[in-house]
Image: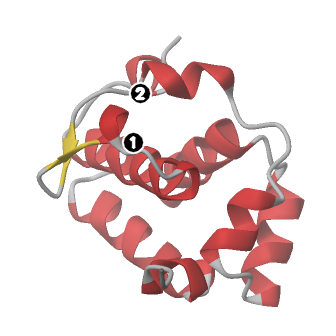
């Protein structure tokens, strides 16, 4: 079975779209970064290195050894798919991130987005 093309896409190619989506709704790049770091466990420096190195999505998530255990509390639909029902682990992580960015753009408070 062939991998979905998002796996080989550089995270750096999608990252500006996350920021643009948030900024269109009055949110900030800093909030997007906070969400990504919360989900993956990366420090800002590590995340920026992945952006600079144009790490693909699959590697970006595979190297995130401190994934937030609270991410399993993320529920809901992204692109017509329930994130909690996605079976493939890497795709589920990508969908979690998509859902968190959607919540940010919809105006949710950061405490709720970060499942505090």
* 36 sits left or right of 6 in the view: right
Q: Residue at x 18, y 41 (%)?
A: 77
Q: Position of residue 51 (x, y in %)?
A: 72, 79
Q: Quadrant of residue 83?
A: top left
Left or right of residue 25, residue 62 in this image: right
| Mark 2 crowd level (few <14, some 14–19, many ≥20, 10 Å Cα) | some
Tell which of 65 and 2 is nearer to you. 2
Q: Which residue is mark 1?
A: 100
Compared with residue 12, is residue 69 higher up or lower down, i.e. above or below? above
Residue at 60%, 77% in the rendered image: 11
The local crowd at label 1, few if under 14, some if 14 to 19, many if 20 or more residues have their Cα within 10 Å, is many
Which structural element holds mark 1? helix
Disc on res. 49: none
Q: Position of residue 65 (x, y in %)?
A: 85, 44
Asked whether the beta carbons under mark 2 and mark 1 sit within 8 Å of each other, the answer is yes
Q: Which residue is mark 2?
A: 113
State the residue at coordinates (51%, 60%).
Answer: 29
Q: Give the farthest residue toward the left.
A: 80
Give the camera-side residue of 110 and 4: 4
67 on left or right of 110: right
Question: In this image, 82 relative to 12: left or right?
Answer: left
In the rendered image, the vertical position of residue 112 relative to residue 58, given as above or below:
above
Label total for image: 2
Residue occupying image coordinates x 27% and y 48%: 102
Q: Is residue 1 above or below residue 83?
A: below
């Amino acid at each position: 079975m062939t991998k979905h093309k998002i796996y080989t896409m550089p995270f750096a190619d999608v990252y500006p779209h996350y920021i643009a989506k948030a900024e269109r709704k009055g949110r900030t790049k800093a909030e997007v970064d906070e969400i990504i770091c919360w989900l993956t466990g990366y420090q800002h420096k590590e995340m920026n290195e992945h952006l600079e190195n144009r790490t693909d999505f699959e590697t970006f998530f595979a190297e995130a050894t401190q994934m937030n255990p609270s991410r399993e509390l993320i529920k809901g639909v992204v692109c017509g798919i329930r994130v909690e029902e996605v079976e493939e682990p890497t795709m589920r992580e990508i969908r979690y991130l998509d859902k968190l960015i959607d919540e940010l753009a919809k105006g949710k408070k950061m405490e709720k987005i970060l499942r505090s």
